[in-house]
Structure formats: C-alpha cells, structure tokens
Amino acid sequence: MYYYNYYIYFIIFVKIILTILFCGHLYYLAKGEKDSENIITIEFWKSRSEFIFEISMALLLIYIFSPNKNRLHLIDHETKFLFYVLGFILLITSDWSLFIGESWFLKMIK
C-alpha cells in the first residue's frame, strides 16, 4: 500500500512539473520569443514530462482495473483527481484535425 501512495505522489509531482512548464511555455509565447533557446528547452521538457505522466497514468489504470484482482478499493480522492486530470489532458492533446478533417458529417455539411 505504501508503494501505491508513493506512486500517486510521483504522478502528482510530474503533473505539477508539467503545469509549471506549460505556464512557462505560455509566458515565453506571450513575450514573443517563439524561437528562443528557453522556449525550446521548455518544449523539450514539457513533452518529456507529458509522456511520463501519460505512461504513469496508463500503468495506474492497468494496475487498478486488472481483471485478475479487484483493486477498486484503491480509488481514493487523489486517484479520482488524477483520472479527472488525465481525461482533460487527453482531450486537449488529442489530434482533433484527424476527426474534424475527415468526418463524413462535416463533409456533408460543407
């Protein structure tokens, strides 16, 4: 049980780092420094931390919803919050142009 808590805290820590990097990225974009070395470094670490967050959440989902064991009792407030945040991150970072550009419904409307 202790490892599970440490893992949840690790995911929250990665999410905080990701949020700070996202805010830094927005700050440099607002300043107009699109090609500066700072924004390139921030984009590099932002993409890496986002990848670590998504992989960590995928492993957490596999662990909790494993069909071999019933671990639903592990879903506490922090885990619910992480699942909630994961949903928003997946919605925001999804490539919507694939759906919108090729949707038969939108082609029919055009």
Image: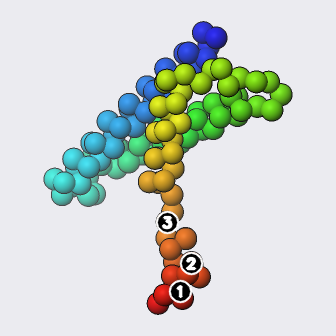
Q: Which mark is residue 103?
A: 2
Query: Of marks 3 and 1, which one's residue comes earlier in the chain?
Result: 3
Question: What amino acid does circle 1 point to?
Answer: Lys
Element marked by disc 1: helix
Q: Residue furthest top?
A: 2
Residue tagged 1:
107
Where does residue 80 sit, x and y in percent of width and height?
Answer: 52, 30
Where does residue 78 sit, x and y in percent of width and height?
Answer: 49, 24
Residue 94 visible at all: yes
Left or right: residue 46 compared with residue 73: left
The residue shown at (63%, 38%) is 58
Left or right: residue 36 compared with residue 58: left
Query: Of marks 2 and 3, which one's residue comes earlier in the chain?
Result: 3
Badge 3 density bin: few <14, some 14–19, many ≥20, Cα 10 Å:
few
Question: Picture quarter containing residue 98?
Answer: bottom right
The residue shown at (55%, 22%) is 76
Give the Cα separation between the discs numbered 2 and 3. Answer: 11 Å
Question: What amino acid does circle 2 point to?
Answer: Ser
Left or right: residue 71 compared with residue 46: right
Question: What amino acid does circle 3 point to?
Answer: Trp
Residue tagged 3:
96
Q: Which quarter shows the N terminus?
A: top right
Element marked by disc 3: helix
Where does residue 5 sit, x and y in percent of width and height?
Answer: 56, 15
Vertical placement of residue 17 versus 34, above or below: above
